[in-house]
Amino acid sequence: MNNNNNMSRQRRKLTHNNALASNNAGRVSKAFLKLLGLTLLIAFFVVGAYGFRLYAQAQGSLDKTFQPLAGKQASTKISESKPVSILLLGVDTTDNGIRDTETNYKGNSDTMIVVTVNPKTKKTTMVSIPRDTMTQIWKSQNNNTKKIQKINSAYNIGDAGSAVVTTEKLINVPIDYYIKVDFNSLKKIVNSVGGVDVDVPFSFSYGDSGEKPSNFTKGQMHLNGKQALDYARMRHEDPNGDYGRQQRQRQIISAIIKSAASAKTFTHFKDVLDSISDSMTTNLSFNDMQTMFFNYRDAADDIKSDHLQGYGQMVDGVSYELASTKEIQRVSDKLRKQLELPEETVNNEETRLNRLNQRRGFSFNYEGDIPQTYKVYKSNQTSE
């Protein structure tokens, strides 16, 4: 058995283990962190705990975050107290401190989570879409790029609107709203809440190129903004790779939520709001946020976490997560049910490619040592 085969089997095993782990309640924080931790939590505390005397200041800061999607009519579902769906995008605009100097560089959306909130059933469902999921990229509902790429590139190709419609097309679920958070602003957010406390799983050092690295010792640590960013970015030294990095990111955001809700943050209220307004864009208006606080907050008591399970595979020299048709359909049915929509058979470019490859012997249940081949067949290459 050669090294490539070993790595392939290990990668598939890790992917499978991650699927099992996703059923744990502790995984909920990954999805919930962007929705409440960085956006609605602040709005909720403004309207509720802080009181209406700070209403104008909060509205001024949060209005800066409002950015509608081009060509997409504003949804009225929140004002009508209907079930809603939200795409959460976590974007890191730096690559070791190099590409963020480029003009208009946007980066990829390395965190993509579909959230449904149903005020009637008082339930919230959150499904993570792996950033390496193979899919066809759309720029708008009527603009298909015909490109088969990783789903996290949709944001880079066409901004939040492209990420929204590409996700809609993949899982056949309408997306009403989006929230995009720039992870690079993490330093300012952490500093604005007075730092965060985390339980470091193992000792390591990490820092961006040209910067002094931060040193982390196993056990409890209090981190400032720079330390928190370094802690959340390190990946290659983690025995669990990107899965370990995601876990540390959840730690940081959970700690931000705790610090933001503490009494010590009250005196830094404006700093917290400014850090949020500088790092986030959304098509949720301030009125939408208020309405969600009053009419949807009970749904936060019943949160279910899930993710689209992928199959690790090299395709034309690029590493992808391939979602089986059965898995895409499962996720689609689950989310549509929460939105009180009827089930529909998913029929898109991903299911077409899966059908063609499976007819040629590819199996999503394969665990052998000889690498399989998954091919991207163009529509004019073969008939079905």
Image (cartoon, helix red, strand yellow):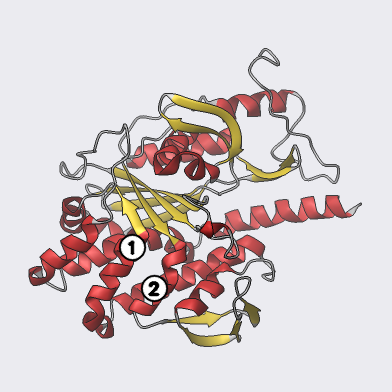
Asked whether 302 or 86 is in front, the reply is: 86
Q: Is there any visible trace of residue 99 in the rendered image?
A: yes
Considering only vertical position in the picture, is 71 above or below 290? above
The residue positioned 53% from the left and 26% from the top of the image is: 348
Q: Which residue has dot 1 on it?
A: 278
The residue positioned 41% from the left and 71% from the top of the image is: 254
Q: Which residue has dot 2 on it?
A: 188
Considering only vertical position in the picture, is 90 above or below 361? below
Query: How far across and down, in percent of the image, does residue 92 sit?
Result: 50, 58
Looking at the rendered structure, the kind of residue marked 2 is Lys
The residue positioned 25% from the left and 49% from the top of the image is: 284
> Residue lying furthest left in this view?
53
Q: Is there any visible trace of residue 301 in the rendered image?
A: no
How crowded is the residue under tag 2: few (<14 C-alpha within 10 Å), some, or many (20+)? Answer: many
Question: Tag 1, which secondary structure?
Answer: helix
Q: In the rendered view, does 138 fall on the left or right side of 244?
A: left
Question: Tag 2, which secondary structure?
Answer: helix
Does the CB distance between marks 1 and 2 fall below 8 Å? yes
Of the two numbered discs 1 and 2 on the same chain, state the one appearing first in sequence: 2
Query: How far across and down, in percent of the image, does residue 295 sit?
Result: 17, 53
